[in-house]
Amino acid sequence: MKFLAIYIFILLPGVIGAQVLTHDDFKSVVPYLQREDFKSAFQKTNQLLEETQNDSSDIRGIVTYINIFSAAGMVATDQMTYDDFAKNANRHIGQRLVMPAHPCIDSAALGYNTLKFIIHNGMLKGMTTTANQSKTTILCFEYFVYKEPVNPTRYIGRNVRCGGILESIEVNPNKSKIWISRIYIRDAFARITP
């Protein structure tokens, strides 16, 4: 009985303190993104991520991605340095990211905020190019190495959400504002969304 009481005493605070992000938490960040208020989006996502460290939900993966994306937006608007961006983004390596859904286009087409499949080093990969609303700065090039085989023809013309495990981040070595970062995702997935 004494052992059971000690066990409950040790585990109970972790169970009580565990919080999972909700859809409402995610929706609280959306207005900042719509106005490209990257600083407020970054601050809010930092707060949400600190409160939910034991959460492995898709919503937490989305909020983690928004944290990196909004930090890139802050670099583009001179509100964060490249070094601070790298420090922030690197703390998420090994974590699950879930990106917004993008229209999937043919690999020969050009487009911002779209997904296309490319062959790189003999391997099929997904790639998105996410930009600010005016398309003057590419905030993130995102590269996906899929865990399971994918058939690109199944996805072309559809909205597709990708995600997976953040493997690494690269910042623009020239520190120009043409593009900010490259994000490399392993064990990726692709889901058709309505």
Image (spheres, rainbow, N blue to C red):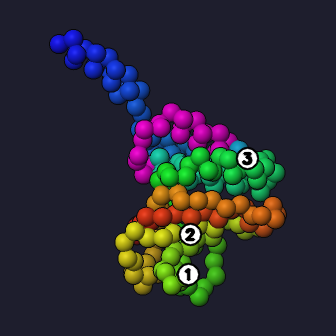
Question: Is residue 160 located in the magenta-colored stretch of the structure?
Answer: no
- Judge the density around disc 2: few (<14), some (14-19), many (≥20) Cα neighbours within 10 Å: many
**Cα distance in 3D space between marks 1 and 3:** 30 Å
Residue at 48% across, 70% down: 145
Work out whether residue 30 can be spotted. no
Indicate the amino acid at tag 2: Tyr
Most foreground residue, 11 or 136: 11
From the image, which quarter does the C terminus lie in?
bottom left
**Amino acid type of the residue tagged 3 in the rendering:** Asp
Q: Is residue 41 magenta?
A: yes
Q: Residue at x 58, y 59 (%)?
A: 168
What is the three-letter code of the residue carrying label 1?
His
Label drawn at residue 84: 3
> What residue is disc 2 on?
143
Where disc 2 sits, the SS reads strand
- Measured Cα–Cα span from mark 1 to mark 2: 10 Å
Residue occupying the point 53% across, 39% down? 49
Left-right relation of 147 to 116:
left
Which picture quadrant has residue 14? Answer: top left
What quarter of the picture does the N terminus occupy? Answer: top left
Label number found at residue 120 = 1
